[in-house]
Image: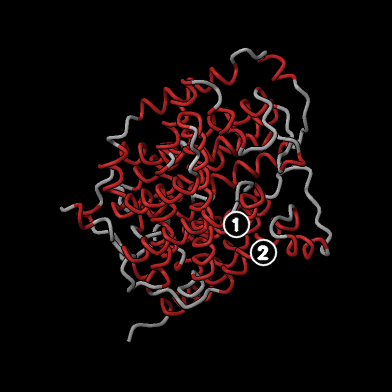
């Protein structure tokens, strides 16, 4: 087997000879993807004042929301990894089974937009960290320079593909340096502070909005997960690598962001990086390690954006799509300021939480396995399943309207009303799952009845 075969593997099922990622490889990959400056910044959103796009939660409530959402979200992410390892195709191609071939085009378009948005966010956050470092060390910020440089780095990593990325980058990067950096930042965030006062500091008790925010951050990876676990050796490797690998750093990183925001008096989430850079030489080194490690998230979004486009353009060369996608993301990072991305997270959750519910319900009722024919010979559109997904999306938005101003104004005419429990994620997931399962069962009844009639026919 040649690794040169894997970087540009398209949408066809991955053959056995290319399924080379074991559970340890997957754990390393997903743990690295979970270690992100964006996750730390997102943790700050939980405790920041509401007028700064935050939720102003107290620390105990924020930590409770982090833990609950981390376990729920990573369970779903692990199941997505298992389904991807079993079917051996990218997630957007996998969605042909429940939604139909053309029915998968809508989530594919949304995922391309998501990957582009995250790529822009990643390049901005990496460049912000690098700029803060270079400004402290050399008196030169060079924000534009860092955006272009890391755009090129993300492109080069995406050209490696998942297998090459794990073997040539993840395994060789000093993971222990990242761990040491996080341990130091945890100490720094509490040094000179009074932990009991931080714990007892007042705040809102809006547990479910915090839960939805953390869950949305994790669930945004479910449309990408099979792009990587399709190279896993076994189904269990796909489950463990994504579900456990992404879980391990999630809780401490979200908690670190919340604690830094409270202990260092951060007024806005992006300002967290500037505060860390100004914390002394050791903080600078820690931020440097995390900034370098952040490039793997940019890789993932560039690579998955290109792979998703292949569901629409299966004959297009993957390397061409990677190059074009990365160039677009870099241009976006140069032209757009997307520093406050909390509304973007909620909007992603409203799309992808019910979408995964539909996929899971259909996969379970298909016998927990998709054959090649169920994916590539699927009907054009399965309207009942698309309807189940959109019903879950509408319920999420009715409970917690998120998106552009014109959209939330439109939703307000429906008199949105949040439930006292469950937030928006759990009800929308449950509704989409139940509707998809019912649609699948009703569709099977005529087939089973026809088989029963055929079985009762006398032999000729």
Question: Who comes first in sequence, dot 2 or dot 1?
Answer: 1
Closest to the observer, 32 or 416: 32
Which residue position is annotated with label 2? 391
Which residue position is annotated with label 1? 354
Closest to the observer, 240 or 165: 165
Tag 2 near tag 1, CB within 8 Å: yes
How many numbered badges does the structure rendering display? 2
Decide if residue 67 is on the left or right side of residue 156: right
For the C terminus, which image quadrant?
Answer: bottom left
Q: Residue at x 59, y 29 (%)?
A: 275
Specify how the rendered protein is coloured: secondary structure
Decide if residue 29 is on the left or right side of residue 80: left
x and y, in percent, of residue 221 in the image: 49, 49
x and y, in percent, of residue 159 in the image: 30, 55
Q: Residue at x 64, y 55 (%)?
A: 347
Q: Residue at x 34, y 43 (%)?
A: 237
């Amino acid at each position: 087997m040649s690794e040169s075969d894997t970087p540009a593997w398209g949408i066809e099922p991955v053959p056995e000879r290319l399924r080379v990622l074991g559970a340890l490889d997957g754990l390393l990959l997903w743990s690295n993807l979970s270690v992100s400056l964006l996750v730390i910044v997102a943790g700050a959103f939980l405790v920041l004042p509401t007028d700064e796009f935050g939720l102003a939660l107290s620390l105990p409530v924020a930590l409770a929301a982090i833990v609950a959402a981390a376990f729920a979200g990573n369970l779903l992410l692990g199941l997505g990894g298992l389904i991807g390892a079993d079917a051996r195709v990218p997630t957007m191609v996998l969605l042909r089974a429940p939604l139909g071939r053309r029915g998968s085009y809508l989530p594919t378009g949304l995922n391309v937009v998501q990957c582009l948005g995250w790529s822009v966010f990643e390049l901005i956050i990496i460049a912000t960290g690098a700029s803060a470092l270079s400004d402290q060390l050399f008196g030169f910020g060079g924000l534009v320079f860092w955006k272009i440089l890391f755009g090129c780095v993300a492109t080069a990593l995406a050209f490696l593909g998942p297998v090459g990325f794990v073997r040539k980058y993840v395994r060789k990067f000093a993971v222990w340096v990242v761990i040491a950096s996080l341990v130091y930042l945890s100490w720094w965030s509490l040094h000179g502070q009074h932990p009991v006062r931080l714990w007892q500091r007042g705040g809102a008790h809006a547990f479910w909005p915090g839960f939805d925010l953390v869950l949305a951050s994790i669930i945004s990876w479910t449309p990408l997960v099979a792009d990587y676990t399709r190279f896993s050796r076994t189904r269990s490797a796909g489950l463990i690598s994504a579900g456990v690998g992404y879980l391990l750093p999630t809780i401490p990183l979200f908690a670190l962001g919340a604690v830094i925001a409270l202990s260092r008096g951060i007024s806005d989430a992006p300002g967290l990086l500037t505060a860390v850079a100004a914390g002394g030489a050791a903080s600078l080194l820690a931020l440097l390690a995390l900034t370098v490690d952040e490039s793997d998230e940019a890789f993932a979004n560039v690579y998955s954006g290109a792979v998703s486009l292949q569901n629409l353009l299966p004959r297009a060369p993957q390397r061409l799509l990677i190059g074009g996608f990365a160039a677009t993301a870099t241009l976006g990072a140069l032209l757009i300021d997307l520093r406050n991305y909390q509304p973007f997270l909620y909007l992603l959750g409203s799309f992808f939480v019910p979408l995964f519910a539909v996929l899971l319900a259909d996969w379970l009722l298909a016998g927990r396995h998709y054959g090649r024919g169920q994916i590539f010979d699927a009907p054009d559109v399965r309207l009942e399943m698309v309807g189940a997904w959109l019903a879950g999306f509408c319920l999420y938005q009715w409970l917690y309207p998120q998106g552009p101003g014109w959209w939330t104004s439109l939703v307000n005419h429906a008199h949105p009303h949040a439930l006292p429990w469950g937030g928006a994620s759990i009800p929308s997931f449950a509704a989409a799952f139940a509707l998809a399962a019912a649609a699948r069962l009703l569709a099977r009844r005529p087939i089973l009845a026809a088989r029963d009639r055929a079985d009762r026919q006398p032999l000729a």
